[in-house]
Amino acid sequence: MFSQGIIVAPASATGGAIAVIRVSGEGSIALCDKVFRGRKALTEAATHTLHYGDIMDGEQVVDDVLVSVFHAPHSYTGEQSVEISTHGSRYIVNRIITLLCEHGARLAEPGEFSARAFAAGRIDLSQAEAVADIIAADSQAAHLIASTQMRGGYSDTLNSLRNNLIELTSLLELELDFGEEDVVFADRSRLEQMLIATMEVVEKLKNSFHTGNAIRNGVGVAIIGAPNVGKSTLLNRLVGEQRAMVSDIAGTTRDTIEESIVIDGIRFRFIDTAGIRTTDDTLERMGIERTLSAIKRAQIVISMAEPTGNFETVELSENQTLIHVVNKADTTPERNNSQAIYISARENVGIENLTHALRETVDTTAAYRGEAVVSNLRHYEALTAAHTALATAHTALVNNISSELLAEDIRLAINHIGEITGSITSDTILQSIFSSFCIGK
């Protein structure tokens, strides 16, 4: 997948007070000795030790640094590895990397450190993907999901499922070996119980994707309603700034405007849409078309109306939530709709009730308990395929289909689960996954 050799890359963003440069590969410690001057050579150092010294370019000091030494296989990549902590100047970082490359290292490709960790068996593929998710996490819930996955909790569940299915397949294949002797090794009633139990776990993981993916990417919230009902004012109130243009002229918003805020550990992506009405204005009509598209993409739809107005009629899927909001409630004391939330976006009235309702739509119980939650589309597709194969196997079992066909369906489910952890994954897929990582990870 990647060529061998010693690789080097910045493992942190430059420009801060401190930057970290990561080096990995057989001979990386000796290579770093060529540019490091400390009390003793790094090759004489014990693993997991820190060493203060200077990075030298000939006789010129480039910077004073702290160097961490890791011996194989006790490192992130499973190889000899060195991490150099230096001052965060872009010039210093680039100069040190250039020096290391001049002495035999090469610049790492995106995701190559994690790919080497995967190849060495230090992490599986789902854990490697969680590294990228940890870096990208911008809310507490997203961090918790990625953290559980990176620590292997998700992998443990998948490996347990896979091992159970392998055991079942082994019993069925043993029957095939002794087919002429009419020997039955697998208790059909117990086999059905195990299949059903496995299907339930796979289905639970699969069904967690709707919430997990929304948490990972931000929960999409479309704000819809008639023109001039206060959608832009609400968006501005929620994000705390004048993000959307507000005017008394109907049809001011011609396009969708998107902003994000975090509410109680969950990131919500608010989409202020163009008001829905019949219009001859070409630009406004295009905005309305984008409004309808935004509604389809959103997990939550806030339908706004004035106290004397009507809510827009929208068709939602079973995975979408509709929240009715009556705006400009400060203009009337009447509360005729018990299912609606009454607010005044302009006067900041009732906004806490709305944000509470938004937070209640996202069930983070599993994530906060440290349970496995699927947030990756690739994993969801593999689990869906595995569940289909298991359902086919269960139907075959109930209908007393031959052990050979039954075993084939179970093997198919095993392969789909293995695709998630990387035990059964092509180099093309691996290359695609790791190439999306940043350099240094």
Image (spheres, helix red, strand yellow):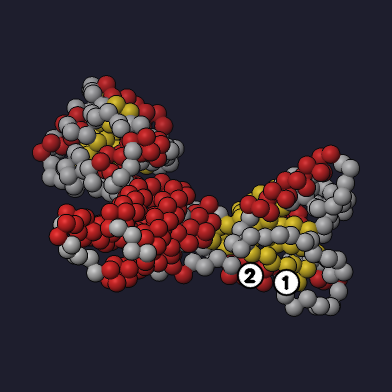
Question: What number is the disc on residue 72?
Answer: none
Q: Which element type, helix, strand or loop, lies under badge 2?
A: helix
- Residue 80 position, x and y percent, is 19, 38
Q: CA distance from mark 2 to mark 1?
A: 9 Å
**Which image quadrant is residue 146 in?**
bottom left
Label 2 is placed on what type of residue? Ala
Judging from the image, what secondary structure is the residue with disc 1 in? strand
Q: Position of residue 437 (x, y in %)?
A: 41, 39
Rendered residue at 84%/49% (across/down): 251
Residue beneath the point at 32% across and 24% down: 98
> Residue at the location (37% across, 66% down)?
398
Q: Quadrant of the N terminus?
A: top left
- Given residues 78 and 67, the one toward you in this image is 78
Do we see residue 139 in this rendering? no
The residue identified by callout 2 is: 357
Q: Position of residue 381 (x, y in %)?
A: 45, 50
Do the numbered discs 2 and 1 sit on residues whose CB atoms are within 8 Å? yes
Q: Quadrant of the C terminus?
A: top left
User: Which of 347/158 is in front?
Assistant: 158
